[in-house]
Image (tube, rainbow, N blue to C red):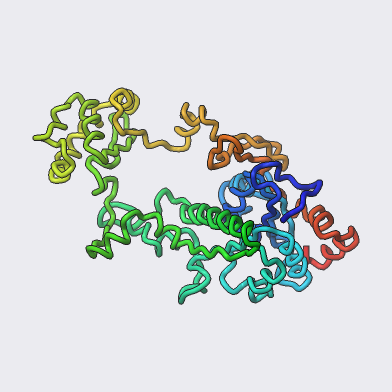
Amino acid sequence: MATETANDTAGTGPLAGIRVIDAASFVAAPYCASILSEFGADVVKIEPPGSGDNMRRFGTPSAHPDGTLAWFSEGRNRRSVTLDLRVPEGAALFKRLVADADVLCENFRPGTLEKWGLGWDVLSALNPSLVMLRVSGYGQTGPYRDRPGFARIGHAVGGLAYLAGMPGGTPVTPGSTTLGDYATGLYGTVGVLVALRHRDRTGEGQVVDLALYESVFRLLDELAPAYAATGTVRGREGVLSGFGCPLGHFRAADGQWVAVACLEDAHFARLAGAMGRPELAAADAWGRAEARRAARGEVDRAVADWIAGLARDDLMARCDAADAPVAPIQDVADLFADRHLRARGFLEPIDEPLTGETLLVPGAMPRLSETPGRIHSPGPALGADTDAVLHDLLGLSDEEIADLRQKGVV
């Protein structure tokens, strides 16, 4: 639907011509907009005048007050427009922008846009082909819809935090990351693309309603069917797991850690070969999964003792030679030094004009052979594109824009 303008920065990817209005904040819904932008969609970021997206203040500070390192990475490929949606003039301009858009991403508390006269009923009447992504902690319906929700809340309610940590210990957030936000952004991207496909066939838009806890819950393999069938409540298993043996994390002689993942008998046979003890994988020893499970403590101790006697690099050389499923547990410094990651070119440099620095950020995903995604700009300065967007897309004059700015609408 969106028409090309001289100021479009989206490029010519497979989603060129798709305009996304990103009225969300932090990670989940904006992450969907970021993925779409990497493949050519034109993303117009709507931010509150004066303060902007809270993501600008999240994470490690940069050399510029307009954004942290997290903002410059996650705010990629956008045009920033300041607009106060709470006032009638701001809401009216927002409606005009949405009327010519393909996708709207928002993550306000359910009912907030409706309170401002910007609910689905109003916006879909203006633009019947609109796809509206709505992200919240608990979804647009249900008794918890009005509760606040963030990734850590989604991890808790969705069942992930209960599984993470040592047996009998405090539940933890895996990696202390906003995993639930990113997972929801990915599901949001899938939902938006499916809805656009439906729109292209029928002309009809629709709402994509996502709850953070549901995205988290969907990632937990057999948790739901196992409980429904057997009443089993899986608890925290620490560094080991009941899904295989050996399956866990082990410490090498130099203090470094590795992950071992023997999910099949053939995997253990390769590991036993790397250990120089192929007899451990014999049929009358631990060659079958049920035998390893029955002797889990002995198996894990044998593997742990062997790993503890080798430095990690030596261990990895032996395991690679035997095709054993073992990998180093890497910190970010390891990742930056990893020759495989460098060969794949996953870390991309982008010039940050606000600070004059070159940043390294995670590249576009997924990796497509013919139409790869790209990062053409870091997170912009707050309101950097307000005048251009209001002038080019809505036809406002310089005088009208100056009046709006004087009133605090933009």
Q: Is residue 128 left or right of residue 215?
A: right
In the rendering, at what x and y percent does residue 407 appear? 82, 68
> Would you identify the image quadrant in which residue 283 lies?
top left
Task: Please state, as top left, top right, bottom left or bottom right, where the N terminus lies in the image.
Answer: bottom right
Up/down of 68 relative to 369, above or below: below
Which residue occupies the foreground of this view, 399 or 209?
209
Residue 24 seen in this snapshot: no
- Front-most of residues 207 and 337: 207
Q: Quadrant of the C terminus?
A: bottom right
Residue 337 visible here: yes
- Residue 316 shown left or right of residue 404 in the figure: left
- Which residue shows up at 20% across the image and 29% down it? 272
**Image location (x, y in percent) of residue 364:** 57, 41
Query: Which residue appears at 17% of the width and 45% of the height?
Result: 293
Residue 23 pos. (x, y %): 65, 61
Viewer-closest of 387 and 173: 387
Judged left or right of residue 58, residue 4 is right
Q: Given the current orientation, which residue lies at the most extreme left position? A: 284
Q: In the figure, residue 288 lies in which quadrant?
A: top left
Task: Residue lying at the far front in this picture: please name it.
Answer: 201
Q: How many marks?
A: 0
Name the residue located 24 percent from the left edge and 29 percent from the top edge: 270
Q: Residue 397: percent from the left, percent from the top? A: 89, 59
